[in-house]
Image: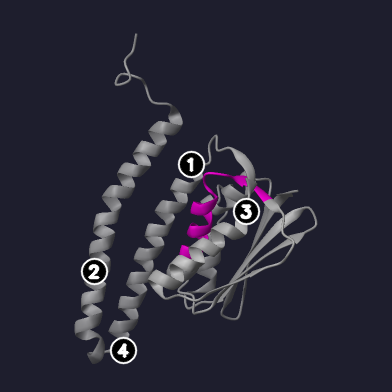
Amino acid sequence: MASGVDRPYTVQEDQERMLRHLAHELRQPLSGIESIAYYLDMVLAAESPEIQLQCERLRRMVQHAHWLIEDAALALRLQGAELGPVSLQDHLIRIGTEMALHEERNLEICVAEPLTRALMPVQLTGAFCQHLLVFFRGVAQARDPIRVNVENEGAFVRLDIQAEVQAELDDLLRAIDPPSPGSGVRRFVKYCSGEMQAMAEGQTLSLSVHFPSIE
């Protein structure tokens, strides 16, 4: 009889272990690059606006790399995740409050009443909402306020996130919704039998996600 120590890993567990290892190994050099960028910005930026620009670009690339790691982790965690009724607005309000208190970021949340619950992976909904907002405030370099709207639309609960961003819109669209096999965000929405659309106009990035509603 195999002991707990000897038990072979499933394919999913093996993938998760490999990703955790890679994430751990990548975060250290990424954090080092980010620290160097901050130092160069602090020491040399006054001498050259171009240096300041490049340092900011470097920091954004590091934040993007961190986000991609988490995006892959989100996709792996979906396998076998249980779907159930979720109060989407509760997660968003909690995260918005934390952002206001700890990051001094302005998140404008508008919730239409009455609002039904959404069919989503119960244990992953909070991580998904956090992941989307990290994309806007970190990768997209969104200016305040980040506008969030939640309402019922037919048989769906619709989540809209919109903000004026500083990063290149084409790059952001490719990051949030790349071609097949797609992003962790797209896979999350598809897992719920939902719909997603990312749009860009001027310097405004908008993301619209529909999740099936449950009375």
Q: Was residue 131 drawn as part of the magenta stretch in this picture?
A: yes
The answer to whether residue 177 is seen in the rendering is no
| Badge number at residue 196 | none
Identify which amino acid the numbered label 2 is placed on: Ser
Residue found at x 53% / y 37%: 79
Q: Which residue has dot 2 on it? A: 35
| Badge number at residue 49 | 4
Mark 2 lies on a secondary structure that is helix
Most foreground residue, 187 or 119: 119
Could you classify mark 2 by the number of other residues whose Cα lies within 10 Å: few (under 14), some (14-19), or many (20 or more)? few
From mark 1 to mark 3, how far is it between C-alphas?
20 Å
The answer to whether residue 24 is seen in the rendering is yes
Q: Are marks 2 and 4 in contact (CB under 8 Å)?
A: no
Q: Magenta region: which residues?
A: 118-134
Could you classify mark 3 by the number of other residues whose Cα lies within 10 Å: few (under 14), some (14-19), or many (20 or more)? some
Q: Nearer the viewer, mark 2 or mark 4?
A: 2
